[in-house]
Amino acid sequence: IEVMACSPSLTAGLTGALLGSKLLRFNRNQTIVCGIRTGALSGYFFTQEFLSSHLALSKKNLAQQSLDQQQQQTDSSWSSDG
């Protein structure tokens, strides 16, 4: 999951540093800190979103498997009664 968030966080960090340098007229040290903070926060939030979407997909798959098992049990009980 961390690998997926690496590229967007790196891009966000570089973009944040560039914007901080050009638009906000940060000096060199402020620009570096701005890039690091932006990248770290972006990576954190991307990771959280990837995690929540994967958890939601897993819950959906588990619910579908449970429904399939119940359907198979219902079908087998109907066929054995006949």
Image (cartoon, helix red, strand yellow):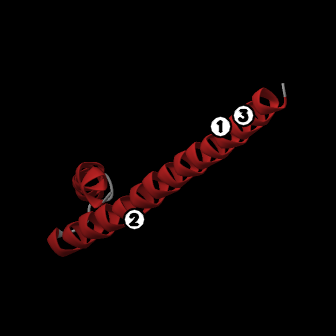
Is 78 positioned to the left or the right of 76 in the image? right
Q: Given contact means CB atoms under 8 Å apart, are the residues at marks 1 and 3 in contact? A: no
Numbered mark located on residue 68 in the image? 1
Between marks 1 and 2, how big is the CA–CA gap?
36 Å
Please, is residue 32 above or below residue 45 in the view? below
**Camera-side residue: 5 or 26?**
5
Q: Please name the residue shown 72% across and 40% down the image.
A: 73
Q: Nearer the viewer, mark 1 or mark 2?
A: 1
Closer to the chain start, of discs 1 and 3, is 1
Please, is residue 9 above or below residue 65 in the view? below
Task: Describe the element under mark 2 as helix, strand or loop.
Answer: helix
Between marks 3 and 2, how big is the CA–CA gap?
48 Å
Kindly give the residue lying farthest to the right in the view shown.
81
Q: Nearer the viewer, mark 1 or mark 3?
A: 3
Q: Please name the residue shown 26% across and 57% down the image.
A: 13
Residue behind mark 2: 44
> Where residue 66 sits in the image (x, y, percent)?
66, 46
* Crowd rating for badge 1 (residues with CA inside 10 Å; few <14, some 14–19, many 20+): few
* Crowd rating for badge 2 (residues with CA inside 10 Å; few <14, some 14–19, many 20+): some
Is 70 positioned to the left or the right of 10 in the image? right
